[in-house]
Image (cartoon, helix red, strand yellow):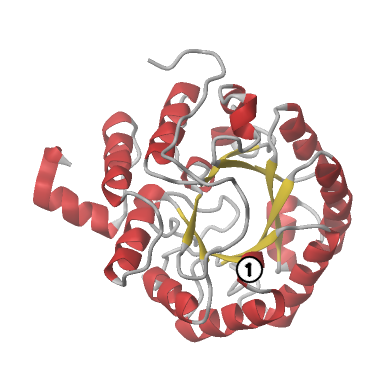
Amino acid sequence: MIQGTRRRLTPPSLPPPELSVNLENARIFEVGPRDGLQNESAILSVDQKIEFIERLVGAGVTDIEIGSFVHPKWVPQMADTDQVAARIAPADLAGENGVRYWALIPNRRGLERALAAGVKYISTAISSSEAHNQSNLNRSIADSLDDLRDSFKLAKDNGCQLRAYISTVFGCPYEGEVDFARVMDIAEQLLDFGADLIALGDTIGAGTPPQVEDGCRRMLEAFGPERVALHLHDTQGLGLTNALLAWRVGMRQFDSAVGGTGGCPYAPSAAGNLGSEDLIHLFNSCGIETGLDLEKLLQTTSWLEKNTPIESVSRYFQYRKSAEGSTL
């Protein structure tokens, strides 16, 4: 039974939470508790979110986005992120159990809340599209960069690691195709400000295989595999194809969400995230190690479906569910 106090989350035996990348393996960044839940009509309780996180840790996940410090008026599904963080032991939030617990912040105020909650792994977001940045963050790209420069300094002064999403890199719901040179320029500035890693966000799942292959290759050549991740949505059914092409050009860090849940409230045409089960099944089939237990991920998705109104759109989960029914 989950108690209303801070608790240690005990994962399998794990290495220290460094950001170095093993070029033979894929690193999976699980966004289910944040990006996966933020666009769902159902709002999970703090107890449910903690159990969700615990199950992911038990499946071997070492990078988990636990929520976001946004104004509850805009994303009510994330209104209790302070409470979620308060239920995780401070030592664990600092990465001492080998797991990195990340939280998204939209601005300096969000960062201050995250720091007060003891979070040491910070995600930020900026769009490569002016129209989407205005819709999502209510400011221009230039103003967002100014805010992030100051926020990154404060975060680094407090010993945080920084992960910066660049959204709409392969297409915007308002502007259409985005000039990838702009993505590269924003990435370079964010790294100069102190970001440890850039996550390329295909926010609406618009990326075609040639776009994704070319964009990933350019980013990897410029910044290296330790500094770049890929965040895919599966709107057009190309998520797995794009992930495999990205792997083949050197991408080693990938975002996904169990059950294929999620989407962006300010990107109306976006489908859910690439399903973690689908991605791990793909990598397993190709002999690519992830360190994750696929069966436990499937059980986590099954738990979500049985205990919340959320329905999985993961194709591999639905295949296994159809074949095995309630035994999954």
Task: Give SS at disc 1.
Answer: loop
Residue 117 shown left or right of residue 309 in the figure? right
Q: Is residue 240 left or right of residue 96?
A: left
Q: In this rendered view, identify the residue nearer to me: 327 or 171.
A: 327
- Front position in the image: 177 or 167: 167
Q: Residue at x 56, y 50 (%)?
A: 265
Residue receiving disc 1:
174
Quarter of the image with the C terminus in it:
top left
Name the residue type under label 1: Tyr
Task: Give the percent coordinates (x, y) of residue 114.
Answer: 72, 34
Q: Is residue 158 visible?
A: yes
Residue drawn 80% across the image and 37% down it: 109
Q: Position of residue 285 (x, y in %)?
A: 27, 68
10 Å crowding of disc 1: few (<14), some (14-19), many (20+): few
Q: Please give the name of the residue rendered at 63% of the width and 77% of the height, measured from the top-left corner.
A: 220
The image shows residue 7 at horizontal and vertical percentages of: 52, 20
Residue 208 relative to residue 137: left or right: left
In the depicted view, which residue is nearer to us: 313 or 291? 291
140 to the left or right of 176: right
Indicate whether 118 appears above or below 172: above
- The residue shown at (44%, 36%) is 11
Q: Quadrant of residue 59?
A: top left
Q: Is residue 79 visible?
A: no
Res 216 → quadrant: bottom right
Give the image location of residue 102, x and y in percent. Answer: 61, 43
